[in-house]
Image (cartoon, helix red, strand yellow):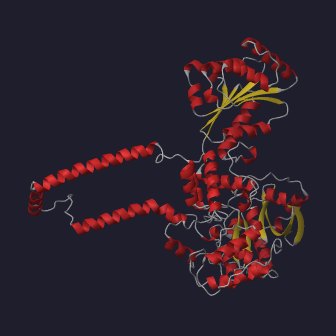
């Protein structure tokens, strides 16, 4: 239903165990390593456990696709079977003929003969049992006996047991210690960490053909907290959140949509048994309140009040005691307490109305990583004159691996999915090896500056980006290839050749081929090789011009809005799209947000209806195409 709306080719959050959608988190990589090691070492038993929905079955499917051609697999998905059915299922999977009335011994003999024959042909057999926590004690004992099928040097059958944590409890039983002692590799697959949620969601969106993030940062936070990091829960929740966002014709999923979806698809403690408990507690609280009220009334009419007042009037307040509070003060304190509690309860909802986009959003370049709940404080931060565009992710020192200024020099490999290892013996690799004297940081900055008709002084008193900003040019950091294409500006890439870093200027991209400047020499190289060699965050420039670079979104009012309205109209006119009719208003209203969203969607940049660096870059390119250096022309 929502696929075409979001530009998807298929549902990105299906719960089917499709190996194409397997996100290899650190834990999944470790689990795969344990499975591969156990198989390569010829061990008897390999045990993989994990909570429901952590991706055990998907990992198993991925393992099957990576097995060599000489491996035969018997996969049992229904573990709720007896000993006879176990042996029959193995025979069915391995295509072993047997009579329906064959005894267990006869079935076992046929399996043994088949394994010996395949072993003689240099073939190996693996038995994989999913949901193994359902296996009975007798079936597990039969499985152990299968491992007795062996030659003098190796086992004829390797067994992988996959199940929930209860499987570990089952194997720890004293009467199954013989089986437990034969386990050669064991791994427990845990849930995803919060730091992995962004990559997980965007990875699945990318596989489904999405070209930009669809979940705001607050939506991702809520997604993790409501799912506990369980991939299957994330998938169910994210799928319903996309549907909810589509039904509201919004461009991005916010935390409200995620929370609403959770109420629809999850049985929470409030909607199930917890609701009964809550009601019981409320009745007890009401009963206690009535009892206390009766005692108080009795005390009042019995003269207790006057006695207390007389006692308080005669005795001074001692240190450590609480002074009496009059009614007005008590009312004020009560109102303050209730107000604080309400603010704490509704803080997330208030923030959801102004959800910030995901990490790669154009607008995220102008804000800090920590979300701000107060809208006035957020506006103040966004309008602060002290903010340097791109300062969150940018410093030209990022190009220098020796810099130590507190800003991490993050390898690109840590910013997203791993890239394939490059071939050091290519023609371009040999060019880099002989160009160390012209691929330094300062040379690259000067070369890129010349594309913008700016020059760095011979002696830099301030940082290069500060010097360039004085000439109207701003630095921007680039984390990945997709973001670089959206920025669409010549970029300084830090490439690796035999553990040495070289800085080149990427100035043109056409399909799978790119042109780079190494010193003053132009070289053509494949996009795949550049991606494989990319080793550090990249750097690009842009010129904000007279419209500035103030971050703007619906609901904000600023003197910069009229200039932005005019600039947006010029960009829309260049591509024959509907324009704004009101240009003098200082309000960033719904009309501006809708026109912005339409332009963003047209050119495949982050579509959030807000104007940040990425949208400014696009508008500048459309308005002044002849004076704006770009990687590729995007004007239709």
Q: Which x, y percent locates residue 385?
A: 57, 79
Q: Which x, y percent locates residue 200?
A: 67, 52
Residue 379: name its quadrant.
Answer: bottom right
Residue 345: name its quadrant.
Answer: bottom left
Any part of residue 454 in sight = no
Any part of residue 293 in sight = yes
| Residue at the image position 52 percent from the left and 67 percent from the top | 372
Nearest the eye: 230 or 446: 230
Position of the C terminus by quadrant:
bottom right
The image shows residue 603, relative to residue 91, as above or below, that is: below
Nearest the eye: 530 or 356: 356
The image shows residue 114, relative to residue 130, as above or below, that is: above
Nearest the eye: 480 or 462: 480
| Residue at the image position 55 percent from the left and 47 percent from the top | 266
Q: Which x, y percent locates residue 392?
A: 62, 68
Residue 102: name its quadrant.
Answer: top right
| Residue at the image position 66 percent from the left and 46 percent from the top | 26
Position of the N terminus by quadrant:
bottom right
Q: Which x, y percent locates residue 348?
A: 50, 61
Q: How many marks?
A: 0
In this view, the residue farthest toward the bottom is 584
């Amino acid at each position: 239903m929502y696929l075409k709306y979001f530009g998807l080719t298929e549902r990105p959050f299906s719960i089917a165990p499709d190996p194409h959608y397997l996100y290899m988190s650190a834990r999944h990589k470790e689990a795969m390593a344990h499975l591969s090691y156990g198989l390569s070492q010829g061990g008897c038993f390999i045990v993989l456990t994990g909570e429901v929905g952590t991706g055990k079955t998907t990992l198993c499917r991925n393992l099957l696709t990576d097995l060599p051609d000489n491996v035969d697999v018997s996969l049992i998905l229904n573990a709720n079977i007896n000993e006879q059915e176990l042996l029959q299922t193995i025979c069915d999977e391995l295509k072993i003929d047997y009579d329906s009335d064959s005894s267990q011994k006869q079935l076992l003999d046929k399996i043994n003969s088949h394994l010996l024959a395949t072993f003689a042909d240099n073939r190996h057999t693996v038995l994989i049992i999913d949901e193994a926590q359902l296996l009975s004690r007798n079936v597990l004992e039969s499985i152990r006996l299968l491992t007795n099928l062996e030659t003098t040097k190796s086992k004829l059958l390797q067994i992988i047991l996959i199940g929930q944590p209860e499987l570990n409890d089952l194997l720890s039983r004293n009467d199954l210690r013989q089986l437990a002692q034969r386990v050669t590799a064991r791994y427990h697959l845990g849930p995803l960490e919060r730091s992995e949620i962004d990559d997980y969601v965007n990875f699945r969106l990318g596989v489904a053909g999405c070209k930009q993030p669809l979940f705001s940062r607050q939506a991702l936070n809520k997604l993790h907290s409501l799912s506990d990091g369980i991939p299957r829960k994330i998938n169910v929740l994210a799928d319903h959140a996309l549907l909810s966002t589509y039904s509201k014709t919004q461009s991005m999923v916010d935390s409200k949509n995620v929370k609403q979806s959770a109420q629809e698809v999850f049985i929470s403690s409030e909607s199930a048994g917890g609701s009964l408990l809550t009601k019981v507690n409320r009745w007890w609280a009401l009963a206690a309140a009535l009892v206390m009220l009766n005692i108080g009334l009795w005390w009042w009419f019995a003269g207790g009040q006057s006695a207390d007042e007389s006692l308080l009037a005669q005795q001074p307040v001692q240190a450590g005691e609480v002074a009496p509070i009059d009614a007005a003060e008590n009312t004020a304190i009560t109102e303050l307490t209730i107000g604080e509690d309400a603010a704490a309860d509704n803080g997330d909802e208030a923030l959801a109305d102004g959800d910030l986009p995901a990490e790669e959003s154009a607008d995220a370049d102008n804000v800090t990583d920590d979300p701000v709940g107060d809208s006035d404080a957020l506006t103040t931060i966004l309008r602060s004159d002290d903010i340097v565009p791109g300062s969150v992710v940018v410093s030209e020192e990022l190009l220098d691996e020796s810099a130590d200024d507190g800003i991490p020099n993050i390898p690109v490999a840590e910013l997203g999915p791993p890239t394939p290892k490059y071939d050091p013996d290519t023609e371009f690799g040999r060019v880099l090896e002989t160009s160390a004297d012209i691929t330094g940081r300062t040379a690259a900055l000067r070369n890129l500056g010349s594309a913008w008709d700016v020059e760095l002084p011979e002696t830099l008193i301030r940082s290069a980006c500060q010097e360039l900003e004085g000439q109207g040019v701003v630095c921007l950091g680039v984390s990945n290839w997709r973001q670089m294409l959206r920025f669409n500006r010549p970029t300084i890439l830090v490439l690796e050749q035999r553990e040495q870093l070289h800085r080149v200027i990427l100035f043109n991209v056409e399909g799978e081929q790119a042109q780079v400047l190494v010193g003053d020499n132009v070289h053509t190289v494949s996009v795949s090789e550049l991606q494989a060699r990319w080793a550090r965050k990249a750097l690009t420039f842009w010129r904000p011009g007279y419209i500035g670079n103030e971050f703007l979104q619906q609901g904000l009012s600023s003197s910069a809005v009229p200039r932005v309205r005019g600039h947006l109209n010029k960009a829309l006119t260049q591509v024959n799209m509907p324009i704004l009719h009101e240009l003098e208003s200082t309000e960033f209203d719904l009309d501006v947000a809708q026109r912005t969203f339409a332009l963003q969607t047209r050119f495949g940049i982050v579509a959030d209806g807000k104007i940040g660096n990425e949208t400014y870059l696009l508008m500048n390119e459309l308005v002044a195409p002849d004076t704006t250096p770009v990687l590729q022309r995007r004007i239709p």
